[in-house]
Amino acid sequence: MIDNTPNLQSIKVKNKYLAVFFEPGILIENGRTIISTNQACALIAKKEKGHWHLWIADPTGKQTIINLTLENTRKIQVILPTGALRGFIKELIL
């Protein structure tokens, strides 16, 4: 368990981070920022061979874009599925 607060629940299993942000927040491990977001979201992230593999969803189904920052340096804008696919998972390899 990394975080278990009203705003963020997260765990790390091997090289995967699993997190639910109930509001904008920062996932920190050992004093190092791993992921920050300015919206609520659920995500799974793993870093392997220098690349991030992300699975992101908005469990509320209300958002169309989620902004993330990886390791305090890489900013990305995730465009979420809309219409009948609203709330589905978006997968990214960076």
Image (tube, rainbow, N blue to C red):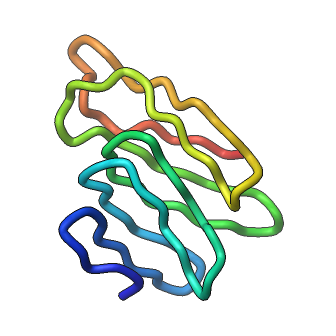
Image side of residue 70 versus residue 64, left or right:
right
Question: Is 93 above or below relative to 35?
Answer: above
Determine the image quadrant of residue 84: top left
Who is closer to the viewer here, 25 or 50? 25
x, y percentage for residue 94?
72, 45
Give the residue at x 74% y 46%. Answer: 74
Who is closer to the viewer here, 77 or 86? 77
Image side of residue 62 versus residue 8, left or right:
left
Extreme-top residue of the structure: 83
Who is closer to the viewer here, 18 or 36? 36
x, y percentage for residue 87?
25, 32
Image side of residue 10 versus residue 92, left or right:
left
Give the residue at x 45% y 33%. Answer: 66
Give the residue at x 56% y 59%. Answer: 35
Determine the image quadrant of residue 30: bottom right
Image side of residue 77 versus residue 40, left or right:
right
x, y percentage for residue 92?
59, 41
Give the residue at x 37% y 40%. Answer: 39
How many numbered badges does the structure rendering display?
0
x, y percentage for residue 48?
73, 68
Question: Is 66 above or below relative to 13?
Answer: above
**Where's the N terminus, which quadrant?**
bottom left
